[in-house]
Structures are given as C-alpha cells and as structure tokens.
C-alpha cells in the first residue's frame, strides 16, 4: 500500500512540475523590437523643446512633479536635448568625413591591386558584411539577436 501511495504521489508531483513549466512558458510576454525610448527614431526629427517636453511629461506621469519640479526638470531635459542635437550633428559630420576617407582609400587600393586581388578583397568584404548582419537583431531573416548564436572569440576566457 505504501508503494502504491508513494508512486501516486511521485507521478502527481512530476505531472504538476510539468504543468507548471508549461504555464510559465505560455505566460512569457512577447518581446517587442525597439521598445526602449532611445531606439525610437521619432526624436531625431524634433526640436529640443519638443523632446524636453515629451520626456518631462513621461516622467511627470510616473513621479507626479510639483509645478516647480516640472519647470526644473524641463530645463534640465532641454539642456540635455540641445546637447544631443549638437552631438548628433557632429557625429553625422564625422561619419560623412569617414565615408569620404574610406572611398579614397578604396580607390587607392583598387589602383594598387590586380583584378584577381580585387575580386578576393570584394568577396572578403561581403563575408564580413554577412557576419555583421547576422549579429544584429532582425538582421538575419527577421530573427532577433537571441535567435542567432553569438560568435565568441577563441582568446576570450568564458
């Protein structure tokens, strides 16, 4: 009798554990791409005042500011937004300079290399582009970053 009772408890425990694991996996929320505020591209086309106002309103909903706090937070957000706009413009300018420099370097390389070497270099560049695309979220057939196995360097201890 004790054996039957212990077997029944064992099987019910296993079935409950299996059921609990199934429930947990179905309740997991679906991951949204670009859900963080910094990933939203809507801020790029706005002026600093609009950005500061939106950020202050979002914080106000959660933190319930007083009028004085709201004004101070707005001024801080406005300063930050102005710096971001300036930084974004500087980065864009640096990127353009880098592209021009890279074009010049590629043209110099093309004048030095033979046609066969140019083809080999072109293939190597394409392989590099493919590996970079596979590491980006959504870069490889719509899969997220977690779906693609990360490539580890052999010299890194893990």
Image (cartoon, rainbow, N blue to C red):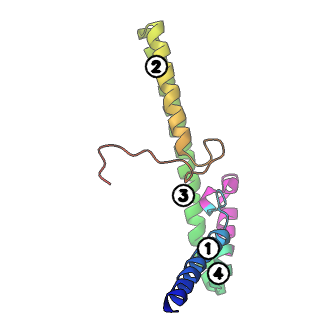
Please state, as top left, top right, bottom left or bottom right, where the C terminus lies in the image: bottom left
Neighbourhood count class around disc 3 (C-alpha, 10 Å): few under 14, some 14–19, many 20 upward: few
Q: Earlier in the sequence, mark 2 or mark 4?
A: 4
Is residue 40 covered in magenta?
Answer: yes
As helix, strand or loop, the secondary structure at mark 3 comes to helix
Q: Earlier in the sequence, mark 3 or mark 4?
A: 4
Mark 4 and mark 1 residues within 8 Å of each other at the beta carbon:
no
Mark 2 and mark 4 residues within 8 Å of each other at the beta carbon:
no
As helix, strand or loop, the secondary structure at mark 4 comes to helix
In the picture provided, is 42 more to the left or to the right than 100? right
Please give the label number shown on residue 121: 2
Query: Which residue is pictured at 49% across the width and 92% down the height?
Result: 2
Query: Which residue is pictured at 50% across the width and 14% down the height?
Result: 119
Q: Which residue is mark 1?
A: 24
Q: Which residue is mark 4?
A: 62
* Comparing labels 3 and 4, the label whose residue is closer to the camera: 4
Q: Earlier in the sequence, mark 4 or mark 1?
A: 1
Query: Which residue is pictured at 66% across the width and 46% down the height?
Result: 142
Q: Is residue 29 visible?
A: yes
For the residue pair 63 and 29, the one nearer the viewer reads as 29
Q: Earlier in the sequence, mark 2 or mark 1?
A: 1
Q: Which residue is mark 3?
A: 83
Which residues are the magenta region?
A: 38-57
User: Alpha carbon of mark 1 to alpha carbon of mark 3: how far?
Assistant: 44 Å
């Amino acid at each position: 009798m004790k054996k039957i009772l212990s077997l029944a408890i064992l099987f019910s425990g296993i079935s409950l554990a299996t059921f609990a694991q199934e429930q947990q996996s179905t309740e997991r929320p679906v991951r949204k791409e670009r859900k963080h505020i910094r990933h939203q591209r809507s801020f790029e086309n706005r002026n600093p005042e609009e950005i500061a106002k939106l950020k202050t309103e979002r914080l106000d909903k959660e933190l319930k500011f007083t009028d004085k706090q709201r004004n101070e937070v707005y001024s801080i957000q406005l300063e930050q937004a102005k710096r971001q706009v300036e930084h974004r413009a500087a980065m864009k300018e640096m990127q353009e300079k880098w592209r021009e420099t890279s074009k010049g370097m590629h043209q110099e390389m093309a004048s030095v290399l033979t046609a066969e070497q140019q083809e080999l270099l072109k293939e190597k560049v394409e392989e590099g582009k493919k590996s970079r695309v596979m590491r980006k979220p959504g870069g490889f057939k719509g899969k997220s970053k977690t779906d693609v196995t990360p490539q580890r360097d052999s010299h890194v201890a893990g």
